[in-house]
Amino acid sequence: MAKPISIEVYNPNGKYRVVSTKSMPGTRWINLLIEQDCRVEICTQKKTILSVEDIIALIGDKCDGVIGQLTEDWGETLFAALSRAGGKAFSNMAVGYNNVDVNAANKHGVAVGNTPGVLTETTAELAASLSLAAARRIVEADQFMRAGLYDGWLPHLFVGNLLKGQTVGVIGAGRIGSAYARMMVEGFKMNLIYYDLYQSTRLEKFVTAYGEFLKANGEQPVTWKRAASMDEVLREADVISLHPILDKTTYHLINKESLATMKKEAILVNCSRGPVVDEVALVEHLKQNPMFRVGLDVFEDEPYMKPGLADMKNAVVVPHIASASKVKLIDT
Ligand SMILES: NC(=O)C1=CN([C@@H]2O[C@H](COP(=O)(O)OP(=O)(O)OC[C@H]3O[C@@H](n4cnc5c(N)ncnc54)[C@H](O)[C@@H]3O)[C@@H](O)[C@H]2O)C=CC1
Ligand SMILES: O=C(O)C(=O)CO
């Protein structure tokens, strides 16, 4: 029997009981639920990742809906528990929903929601930040400075990769991948090569128009290419950013073989989901190729990194913070 879990309650006499497994930013979502006659219970337990047992205890005997997080395993066990408690809706506070077994939810008559579109720019901006940090060796240089090792300017000190005129490769040119591509093309005048199951006509038009603008101003125009295979992107791009969904087709999309296909001095960025990259193979590749650099927001076994990754100077690692940005507050 799981221990009772601490909660904060809003609108205790509401007709529908809605549980949120975590406190979330702002109050607008709470007010919206209250307007719909919901009693809102927010889990305040000081534990970053709740277990299935913890969530079953939160659901209890009567629960109409749950708002959950990407760190939780929403499969058969939880949807069965929610359905037994009378639950009809589950909302994943995330764009990616690889942690949710939608078939199990359907089987138990629970509707599933996620948050597509709200993190497009913030995630693309972090991917751009990681691309720059890796290209210009920002973290290594920062550590060198703080260690008191800087004893004067030198022509070869922390030479990195100039992005202008290089090729950016995007794998998964959906909302986030396209936003990232636009930033890199427009911001750094990079050429684009992308691979996706679908054509991104808007992105192609954007690069064409920007190329024409540059040409009209006497500058080298940028170009785009839709690759027929992922390997084409891996072979040709200097910076490769991963933005597909995580499913069976993208699990370990980047593995020993695909890493070997990339340029020796390429930069790989992952802001999608950790298991898109075989992290053990990546660590080995980083060891063998010191000029190959990587920027990672997500990891295969979050919150852990595979052995050796933390020691690699050619890796920039941040703890899944692509969504962690503030916009002008609308409700305080
Ligand atoms: N690091 C973070 O904090 C965040 C990560 N994400 C991740 O980013 C992912 C993408 O988000 P969006 O761009 O909004 O989704 P989206 O659905 O607009 O784009 C995903 C793209 O991947 C493509 N794709 C699917 N399978 C593929 C394959 N086998 N090969 C190549 N392309 C493939 C799809 O056709 C689609 O264009 C989410 O599913 C989520 O996992 C999203 C938000 C924040
Ligand atoms: O929304 C998502 O998919 C995230 O990864 C949020 O950080």
Image (spheres, rainbow, N blue to C red):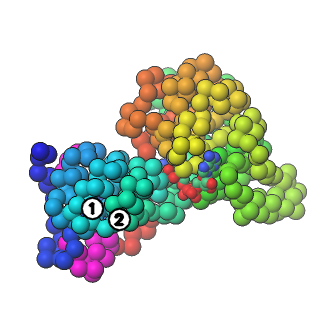
Residue, x 16% and y 58% (percent of image)?
A: 60
- Cα–Cα gap, marks 2 and 1: 7 Å
Element at label 1: helix
Element at label 2: loop
Q: Nearer the viewer, residue 47 or 255?
A: 255
Residue, x 85% and y 51% (percent of image)?
A: 220
Counting from the top left corner in percent of width and height, residue 299 is at: 45, 37
Relative to 26, is 226 above or below? above
Q: Is residue 237 left or right of residue 25?
A: right
Q: How many other residues sit within 10 Å of disc 2, few (<14), some (14-19) or many (≥20)? A: some
Counting from the top left corner in percent of width and height, residue 97 is at: 44, 54
Q: Is disc 2 in contact with disc 1, using a CB cutoff of under 8 Å?
A: yes
Classify residue 208 by image quadrant. Answer: bottom right
Counting from the top left corner in percent of width and height, residue 246 is at: 52, 46
Magenta residues (range): 27-48
Q: Residue furthest top?
A: 288
What amino acid does circle 1 point to? Ser
Residue, x 45% and y 36% (percent of image)?
A: 300
Q: Residue furthest front?
A: 107
Find out whether residue 258 is within the magenta segment: no
